[in-house]
Image: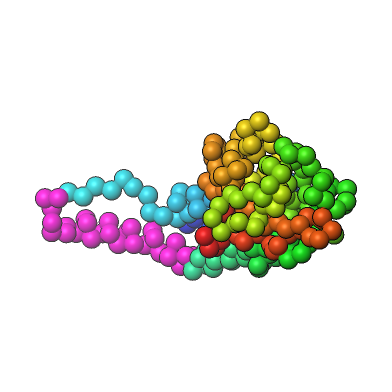
Amino acid sequence: MSSHQREARATNRIAVAFGVTAAAAVGLAITYGLGGQSQVEGALLAIALGGLGYGFVEVAKHLLPQGPYVEEREQLVATPEDVASFEQALERGQPWLSRRGFLVKMLGLAAGALGIAALFPLRSLGPNPGRTLFHTRWRKGTFVVDEQGERVRVDTLDVGGAITVFPQGSVGVENSQTMLIRLTDRDFVTRDGRETWGPEGYVAFSKVCTHAGCPVGLYQQQFKKLLCPCHQSTFDVPDAASVSFGPATRPLPQLPLMIDDDGFLRSQSDYEEPIGPGFWNRGR
Ligand code: FES
């Protein structure tokens, strides 16, 4: 088989490989659009990338000029043999140069289809959260209720007690879950500026861990600490739930409480800062 025939066959194989890549990429996009199936998507991606890789290897093996090349540094003047050899090499490369346009188009088709297919998973990022990360369901005057939806009264907890509470009407809403703790039977101040937040010794902190978002559900009554079971971050409740141990880097946000004329606990407002783990535009 002549070298021209070999190169022609290699060109066909490369074109087929790039075509397979394009077809697999289109199949990938369609599969994703129909709802997705991880195994099928993985197989199609492997075929697409495999086709691309195979094509590149074939180009390198059969179409690019092969060595070895030896240049005699001393002979800087071209001899007739050099000229003849150069012309021969140039001729050898001619078919490749003429096929290159076709193969570049096939490569463009394959890379384009793969690139478009790669854009589809962007849809999986879901809707823009907007301002929802900055707010919970707590509002001014919202009744504090327990996990059964019963309103919490000033006499619900003894000193030392702790329960999980929610805003009335939002039991189970994850970003609003809150730990309610009774530290004393007198107003309790955790920080300057929070003089009215802890009526009758009740203090409330977001239950969403500021490390990675696990529920901070364990209250150590003896030490007045809240403990996150995921990575053992520990929060010092009387000190405004500051971090005393573990990987969390900021305190649990405190919910301002009040007690109404009928003895029910209510929130004074939403949390004053975003709850849970930090994120890129949290602001502070
Ligand atoms: S999620 Fe709470 S310590 Fe990691």
Residue 27, percent across and down? 72, 59
- Residue at the far top in the pictured view: 222
Residue 74 highlighted magenta (yes or no): yes
* Residue extending furthest toward the left: 74
Give the mark count. 0
- Position of 185 compared to 282: left or right? right
What's the colour scheme?
rainbow
Residue at 16% x, 57% y: name it.
Answer: 79
Q: Which of 156 and 13 is in front in this view?
A: 156
Q: In this view, does 108 lie to the left or right of 174?
A: left
Measured as percent of width and height from the top left, residue 233 is found at 59, 38
Can residue 170 be seen? no
Q: Is residue 101 visible?
A: yes
x 17%, y 49%: residue: 72
Most foreground residue, 240 or 10: 240
Residue at image position (50%, 53%) is 56
Q: Residue 52, relative to residue 225: is it above or below?
A: below
Where is 54 relative to 106, above or below? above
Nearer to me, 193 or 15: 193
Residue 204 appears at what percent x and percent y? 69, 50
Indicate the quadrant where residue 265 lies.
Answer: bottom right
Who's the residue at 71% across and 44% down the image? Answer: 185
Q: Position of residue 13 (x, y in %)?
A: 58, 54
Q: Does the magenta stretch include residue 233?
A: no
Classify residue 156 as left or right of residue 44. right
Q: Dominant secondary structure of the magenta stretch? A: helix
Pick whichever, 192 or 81, lies toward us.
Answer: 192
Figure check: 90 above or below 3: below
Q: What range is drawn magenta here?
A: 73-100
Query: On the picture, is 211 further left or further right than 26?
Result: left
